[in-house]
């Protein structure tokens, strides 16, 4: 057993951890709905219901807040991948499941939008060793599923694994999800199934493929 698991936290420490979890969830929501550039520390503090000075005792800057939220999302994603690796699902179904997990976060406004290339946040993420290590681990795991699915002839081999990987990452910030939800015509699971189908099956009519084989 990990020695740290035997450490009993004080009431104050537990409260601090709960408050930090609340802050991170709030930041995730604001990054998803407003983006990093328009999100403000004042807004975060007001939403959580604490003074800005108290917020800074947890996280020293806006960049630190955003990085913590993105690291948290990455941790959750890696936990999903680890759980999937313990199952007997095919590589294709693992790819679908992790993609749908990301889409559910997006639909519930808890998937942070990725920073633009010239964003200060992007520079902080590139310099954050833990985040980058987790990103590499996630990409390696999903990349292995892609290669296995190609070897099993479950997905196309005419597209490189790297292109497929980036396409799946893009589903985490796909505006189609929000457009379909705002229409009010579909339930969340219907939206996820439709977008999953367009991603993995394409939009060409099956008869078209048969005629051109």
Image (cartoon, rainbow, N blue to C red):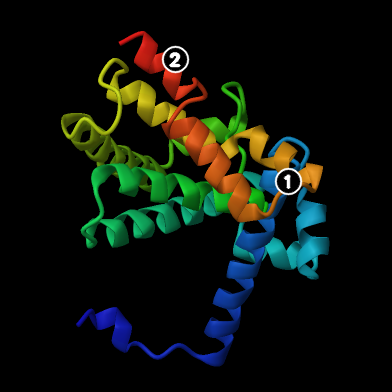
Residue sitting at 37 percent across and 26 percent down?
164
Residue 23 falls in image quadrant? bottom right
Foreground residue among 96 and 44: 96
Determine crowd level at label 2: few under 14, some 14-19, many 20+ residues with C-alpha closer than 10 A: few
- Residue 146 position (above or below residue 44): above
- Residue 80 position (above or below residue 54): above
Q: Are marks 2 and 1 in contact (CB under 8 Å)?
A: no
Residue 36 falls in image quadrant? top right
The answer to whether residue 85 is left or right of residue 191 is left
Foreground residue among 163 and 130: 163
SS type, badge 2: helix
Quarter holding the C terminus is: top left
Q: Name the residue under label 2.
A: 208
Asked whether residue 76 is in view, the answer is yes
Q: Residue 134: image x %, image y %?
A: 35, 46
Q: Name the residue under label 1.
A: 181
């Amino acid at each position: 057993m990990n020695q740290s698991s035997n450490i009993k936290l004080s009431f104050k420490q537990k409260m601090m951890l709960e408050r930090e979890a609340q802050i991170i969830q709030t930041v995730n929501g604001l990054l998803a709905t407003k983006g990093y550039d328009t999100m403000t520390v004042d807004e975060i503090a007001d939403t959580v219901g604490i003074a800005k000075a108290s917020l800074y005792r947890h996280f020293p800057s806006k960049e630190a807040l955003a990085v913590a939220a993105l690291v948290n999302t990455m941790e959750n994603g890696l936990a999903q991948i680890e759980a999937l690796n313990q199952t007997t699902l095919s590589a294709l179904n693992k790819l679908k499941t992790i993609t749908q997990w990301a889409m559910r976060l997006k639909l519930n406004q808890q998937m942070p939008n990725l920073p633009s290339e010239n964003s200060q946040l992007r520079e902080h993420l590139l310099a954050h060793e833990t985040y980058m290590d987790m990103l590499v681990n996630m990409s390696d795991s999903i990349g292995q599923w892609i290669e296995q699915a190609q070897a099993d002839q479950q997905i196309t081999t005419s597209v490189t694994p790297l292109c497929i990987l980036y396409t799946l990452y893009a589903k985490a910030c796909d505006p189609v999800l929000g457009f379909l939800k705002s229409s009010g015509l579909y339930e969340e699971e219907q939206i996820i199934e439709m977008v999953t189908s367009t991603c993995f099956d394409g939009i060409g009519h099956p008869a078209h493929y048969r005629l051109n084989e």
